Image (spheres, rainbow, N blue to C red):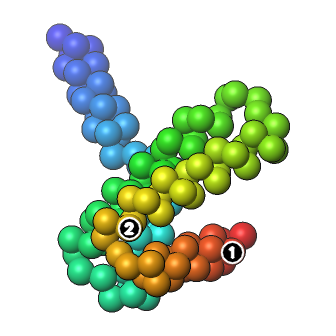
């Protein structure tokens, strides 16, 4: 009986601990969206939408690239398409100037990480 209870407690702990992990893409989208929101004084709803767009971008590119043994040229094509798709989605939220600012801030943020 003690072993069964211990097993149940251990399993529930493992599920709970695993559910709290954030993927790399989620962390990157969170930090980038927060950084941009702070710099551009975005509202909470704009920040949430920006986070959603960035998360989608990071997950899609990761899904297309990881484990596919692609050349640098093939990766460039995927990144360019992702950039265009992201800008198209951002155009529903922001003006052209604001989109340029978002892209500049993303580049700035990613350079700081390296």
Callout 1 secondary element: helix
Q: Earlier in the sequence, mark 1 or mark 2?
A: 2
Toward the viewer: 2 or 28?
28
Q: In which quadrant is the C terminus drawn?
A: bottom right
x then y, percent, for residue 19: 32, 39
Residue at image point 43% right, 59% down? 88
x then y, percent, for residue 78: 64, 44
Any mark on residue 111, and which? 1
Residue at image point 52% right, 79% down? 100
Nearest to viewer (mark 1 / mark 2): 2
> In this orientation, does residue 109 appear?
no
Toward the viewer: 51 or 84?
84
Q: Is residue 93 left or right of residue 67?
A: left
Label tally: 2
Q: Which residue is mark 2?
A: 91
**For mark 2, does the 10 Å Cα neighbourhood hold few (<14), some (14 to 19), or many (20 or more) residues?**
few
Q: Is residue 78 left or right of residue 31?
A: right
> In this orientation, does residue 65 appear?
yes
Note whether 16 is above or below 6 in the view shown. below
Note whether 4 is above or below 89 in the view shown. above
Residue at image point 65% right, 35% down? 66
User: In which quadrant of the rendered view does residue 106 lie?
Assistant: bottom right
x then y, percent, for residue 47: 30, 71
x then y, percent, for residue 98: 43, 82
User: In which quadrant of the rendered view does residue 64 lie?
Assistant: top right
């Amino acid at each position: 009986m003690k072993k069964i209870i211990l097993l149940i407690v251990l399993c529930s702990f493992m599920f709970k601990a695993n559910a709290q992990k954030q993927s790399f893409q989620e962390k990157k989208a969170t930090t980038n969206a927060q950084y941009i929101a702070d710099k551009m004084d975005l509202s909470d709803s704009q920040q949430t939408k920006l986070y959603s767009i960035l998360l989608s971008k990071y997950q899609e590119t990761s899904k297309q690239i990881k484990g596919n043994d692609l050349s640098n040229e093939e990766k460039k094509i995927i990144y360019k398409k992702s950039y265009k798709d992201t800008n198209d989605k951002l155009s529903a939220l922001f003006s052209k100037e604001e989109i340029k600012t978002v892209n500049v801030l993303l580049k700035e943020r990613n350079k700081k990480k390296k």
